[in-house]
Image (spheres, rainbow, N blue to C red):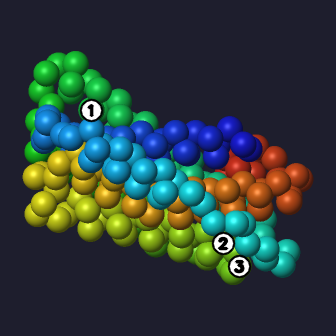
Amino acid sequence: MHKISGMTRTALFAAVMLLMACDQNTSESTEPAADSTASDQVMQELKTEPLKDFPKTTEDPHDIAVLTDYEQRFQEMSAELEKELNSMRDEDSLSPEFIQQRQRDHVQSALNMLKDLELKTEQGRYIQGMMYQYWQHQDKLVNSPETQTKTVNEASESVKGLGKYLHAQEQLERWRSQYPDLNANTASARPAS
């Protein structure tokens, strides 16, 4: 189970790096002091809140399965996007406009997938909300007119809210650990809503 969570973090990290890479390509000269400040801001964003305690409910296994299914589908979508972009980069047919459109599509897909989750518990909705807040910020970022003119100094904006997403991942991982009877078969099954 921990492998899925780690894979999701990897996919999320790749998505963030993709967003930041586009920002870095638009500006080649930066000041070292500004880079240090941006790094400090990124590290601050990566700090997560303490995990919250929620009472166990009979609906916990359902919500864990729904969130695990979301993670798997999101990971598959991210892997396909990365594969497509790498293929186009290898063929030298990748344009900045196409990358930006795929970023928008990726963010919108994450938002739609999260919005469609039918969760029944407070903890499930809490995790969903934390993830949704992160993707809402990314949506604002990729759809802002300044996206193409951002500098490396502003690249830390791409990771804003990432700590909340990571907190949601940690919360879900701990929640899963409270139900050791839920095995990999449950995780791979598409739950009925």
Residue located farthest toward the top when viewing the structure as drawn: 90
Name the residue tied to disc 1. 85
Q: Position of residue 32 (x, y in %)?
A: 27, 38
Judge left or right: residue 85 versus residue 15.
left
Quarter of the image for residue 33 reads top left
* First in sequence: mark 2 vs mark 1: 1
Question: For the residue labelled by badge 2, is the local secondary structure a helix, a strand or a loop?
Answer: helix
Judge by depth and name the residue closer to the eye, 33 or 6: 33
Judge by depth and name the residue closer to the eye, 11 or 58: 11
Tell me the quadrant of the picture where the N terminus can be found: top right
Residue at 26% x, 24% y is 87
Q: Is residue 167 above or below residue 89?
A: below
Q: Position of residue 109 (x, y in %)?
A: 36, 59
Name the residue tied to disc 3. 121
Dot 2 crowding, Cα within 10 Å, few <14, some 14–19, many 20+: many
Residue at 46% x, 43% y is 13
Image marks 2 and 3: residues in contact by CB distance under 8 Å: yes
Question: For the residue labelled by badge 1, is the local secondary structure a helix, a strand or a loop?
Answer: helix
Residue at 40% x, 55% y is 41
Residue 124 numbered tag: 2
Q: Is residue 152 among what the camera can see?
A: yes
Q: Position of residue 176 (x, y in %)?
A: 77, 56
Question: For the residue labelled by badge 3, is the local secondary structure a helix, a strand or a loop?
Answer: loop
Marks 2 and 1, Cα distance to the nearest angstrom?
A: 33 Å
Marks 1 and 3, Cα distance to the nearest angstrom?
A: 37 Å
- Please state which amino acid type lies under the numbered disc 3: Thr
Q: Is residue 58 among what the camera can see?
A: no
